């Protein structure tokens, strides 16, 4: 089965995307894979599989590989006397800006290229943690209380709390504030990455569970549920290593009622909004109640380690993709007006 | 001042966009205008000003005009031995899908082209009437009560009510239901255009006021407030004619307190979300309280008829546009990992 892995992007998570793509490629051995890299200037390159290692990018060696242009139905490679169209469906693996903010989804949609990715509406709600709260509220999925601050605002809740830039993933710019003396610095850090910042109470030793899934033929296919390794939160370095992980994880020990609660919350969030995407939702459980912490609309290395048969999931998801309904333009009104005018 | 008017699109409002573009071009006589047409296949054409009339499109004559490709910084016209880049900032005048759903904004952003238009986040909240409600709620702007229906659902509120497809403008698929016998037909009509439908109480003789504006250098510049012509609602035919209107309107007779209330609601909605756009908000006033009815993120013919000096507004808005902050990729993590590995 053919698949194009699209990675890179003009994003703070550019490097994470490279690592993620290297991992996912290895986890799909039976696929016929094209690799397309988007550099920070938004140029696309066709990457030779043999050169698919971090150094090809950090050394700018990729710039010697063939340049591609987005075109109707795929990515076009111009040769001296001909053109080649890479028209395989795309797996959008650009984490952070471009990939998770809806830009790439809109671009692929506009050019009629099939793709696995959250669509732009889903991206807008998951990329911005403030909008994620609105979405969850509207679907009756609980989240922690929160405040949204703009530059100059101070949190009104008391320590300990966690401060996050509204629109970044991979824990970039995130701080746990345990003492009031740390507030200003933590705010400065977060405001480096966004003009809006989310503040939430920090709950020590809160139970965390991660669940991934995607809708295939109207049915959600769930991954196993993971209880992530216990540490306050993953900082960028740890997350970076985490994105390249290749081993399976152990399933969390949960009773059926809790498994169903977590799945029900996942299903509400996924809804129709995330169709076409494989996402991971990170939940808290407090007093047996499920709270949505975060939606990862393009999880690191596609959360392959949570699925028993990752290749089958991706294959079936690809087969179930539906194209955007095309609008037919028939100039009915212009014709009728011209007729009325005798033209 | 240079400006590219982009119009057309694969949208139910394709024809309205053509009419809108013809009108706006006439209302900006001192501008040096390029006209770029996006057809239903998503091909771009450079339209000769002399051919800027409805018939050039309905007769497919536009297909003989030069084809353009989006490229970094502008639209590229390939000539036999050279290339021309149309790099003027773009006024996104594509109404409905493509233009108002965030696709065009994402495309222009990706290719580093400056533009007047709601950005993709703003589009997602204004294109879908259900999401508009979430946005308004979160900003403490009142809206009418509502229900969102999926295929098979029935309204639980009693007649009279108004049924609208969640994601279309220009009154397409909208019905006022006054008798229960009309419900099924009205739902069928609305579901032709969207899989989700919004139902709201219909309030006869409700006071309606339209207010347009845009933020220029951190300050919102308001239009006059119009009380639109009294009819139940504008259907597509009437709206079509409305989009080509060229005369100024009379200002609504309102006391200062109400003007300030309407402006305050507009400002809350506009916020930072709509920066870069000139929008029109349509409000109801019931018992002296302001309710948001609809956000028109790309109003018909840019609501030029509501501004005393439309050319100055567009000129100043163009001058105040800020480019998207670029992310710098420095491969710091890959370098440090390679160093640790001794590479």
Image (cartoon, coloured by chain):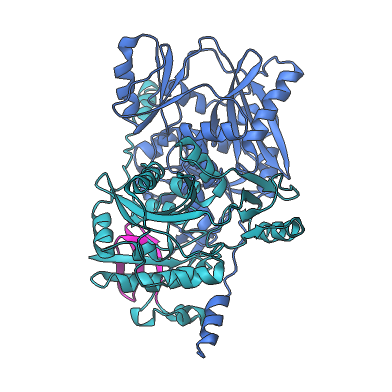
Chain colours: A blue, B cyan
Q: Indicate the position of residue B130 as horizontal and vertical percent values.
A: 57, 45
Say if residue B70 shows up in the picture: yes
Camera-side residue of A194 and B151: B151
- Which residue occupies the foreground of this view, A162 or A35? A162
Q: Quadrant of residue A23?
A: top right
Residue A95 drawn at (x, y percent) = 47, 37
Q: Nearer the viewer, residue B141 or A89?
A: B141
Residue A92 visible to the viewer? no
User: Which residue is pictured at 49% across the width and 41% down the height?
Assistant: B142
Does A274 sit above or below residue A260? below
Tell me where the magenta segment starts and ends, as one range: B66-91
Relative to A329, is B169 above or below? above
List x then y, in percent, for residue B20.
42, 69
The quarter of the image holding the C terminus of chain B is top left
Residue at figure coordinates x 37%, y 73% from the top left: B246
Q: Is residue B75 magenta?
A: yes
- Magenta-drawn stretch, dominant element (helix, strand or loop): strand
What residue is shown at x 62% (from left), y 61% (from top)?
A: B173
- Is B71 rendered above or below residue A132? below
User: Looking at the image, how many numbered discs can be counted on the residues?
Assistant: 0
Q: Nearer the viewer, residue B241 or B127?
A: B241
Direction from residue A129 to residue A39 in the image, left or right:
left
* Picture quadrant of residue B48: bottom left
Q: Residue at x 27, y 55 (%)?
A: B317
The reply to whether the magenta stretch includes residue B225 is no
Q: Pick the quarter of the image with the N terminus of chain B.
A: bottom left
Left or right for B253, reference B193 = left
């Amino acid at each position: 089965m053919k698949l194009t892995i699209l990675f890179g992007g003009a994003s703070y998570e550019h490097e994470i995307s490279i690592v993620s793509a290297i991992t996912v490629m290895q986890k799909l051995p039976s696929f016929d894979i094209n690799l397309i890299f988007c550099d920070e200037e938004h140029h696309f390159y066709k990457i030779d599989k043999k050169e698919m290692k971090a150094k090809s990018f950090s050394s700018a060696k990729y710039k010697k590989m063939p340049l591609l242009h987005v075109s109707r139905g795929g990515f076009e490679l111009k040769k001296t006397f001909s053109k080649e169209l890479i028209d395989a469906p795309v797996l959008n693996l650009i984490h952070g800006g471009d990939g998770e903010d809806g830009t790439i989804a809109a671009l692929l949609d506009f050019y009629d290229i099939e793709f696995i990715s959250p669509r732009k509406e889903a991206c807008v709600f998951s990329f911005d943690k403030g909008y994620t709260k609105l979405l969850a509220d509207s679907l009756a999925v609980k989240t922690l209380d929160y405040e949204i601050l703009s530059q100059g605002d101070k949190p009104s809740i008391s320590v300990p709390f966690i401060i996050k830039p509204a629109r970044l993933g991979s824990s970039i710019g995130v701080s746990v504030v345990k003492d009031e003396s740390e507030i200003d610095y933590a705010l400065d850090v977060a405001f480096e990455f966004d003009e809006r910042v989310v503040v939430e109470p920090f709950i020590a030793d809160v139970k965390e569970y991660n669940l991934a899934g995607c809708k295939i033929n109207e049915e959600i296919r769930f991954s196993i549920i993971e209880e992530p390794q216990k540490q306050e939160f993953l900082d960028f370095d740890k997350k970076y290593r985490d994105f390249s992980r290749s081993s399976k994880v152990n399933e969390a020990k949960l009773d059926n009622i809790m498994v169903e609660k977590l799945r029900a919350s996942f299903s509400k969030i996924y809804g129709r909004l995330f169709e076409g995407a494989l996402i991971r939702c990170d939940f808290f459980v407090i007093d047996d109640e499920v709270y949505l912490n975060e939606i990862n609309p393009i999880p690191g290395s596609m959360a392959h380690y949570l699925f028993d048969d990752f290749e089958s999931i991706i294959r079936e998801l690809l087969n179930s993709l539906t194209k955007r309904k095309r609008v037919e333009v028939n100039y009915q009104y212009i014709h009728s007006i011209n007729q009325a005018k005798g033209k």
